[in-house]
Amino acid sequence: MVESAKIKQLHKIVTALERFHTRKESLFSLDKLTTYLTLSERELEEMLELVFQFQNLFNSVLTDSILCKKWKNNRYYLILKPKSEISSREYATLKEIEINQNQMNLLSDTIYYFQHVKIGKGFDVKRNGTELSKKVKQLNRSHPYFFEYRGNGLIYPTKLAVEAGKLIQSYNRSKKNVSKLEIEDYLIQIV
């Protein structure tokens, strides 16, 4: 593929192709494009090959689907979603977290302890050898987006963790089973 092409060059090509769309009867000068982007002849050929591959991809694979960026368990993925299922809001990154029931119960207990016992004080997972600290450290390793460091050697639950913990506590009080939680841009699936 085009290894020497820069992101700026790709943006310039996209902009040039957008202008070409409005002037369908015009000729698109590849010499001017080569000069404008300071590409060699070989780089231009590779760039055009890439553009044509994208064109084929969008005409064949993506006719009924939309390519979306999905965040799942602290990693980004590309997924295809049917156009009929997509709202304009969903063009943003879909953030999905998978967590097992034991981890979710631990998160709920941690949030309860943080709010009612520690009353907003963080957890010392380095020096404190309590069972809860060990479990919080494990949970932080597997789901780092639930905790944040604030520079004082302690970790604190994030806003997402607090909201998820409160919701789980609410479901537990009402004895309802829950398989997924939606919090802001996040979908937390309990597996």
Image (cartoon, rainbow, N blue to C red):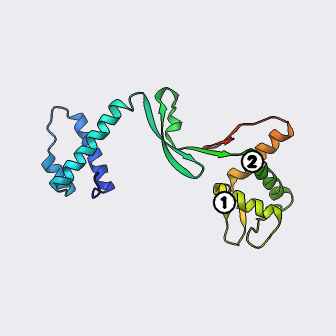
Asked whether, in this view, residue 81 is left or right of residue 152, the answer is left
Name the quadrant of the C terminus: top right
Foreground pick, 4 / 12: 4
Residue 104, numbered label? 2
Q: Secondary structure at mark 1?
A: helix
The residue pinned by badge 1 equals: 141
Residue at 68% from the left image edge and 50% from the top image edge: 160
Residue 113, numbered label? none
Near mark 2 (Cα within 10 A), the count class, few <14, some 14-19 or many ≥20, is: many
Count how many numbered circles sit on residues in the image.
2
Q: Can you give x and y, in whole percent of width and height, for residue 38 in the image?
A: 19, 58
Looking at marks 1 and 2 on the same chain, the residue that comes earlier in the sequence is marked by: 2
Quarter location, residue 60: top left
Near mark 1 (Cα within 10 A), the count class, few <14, some 14-19 or many ≥20, is: few
Foreground pick, 36 / 62: 62
Confirm whether residue 109 shows in the render. Answer: yes
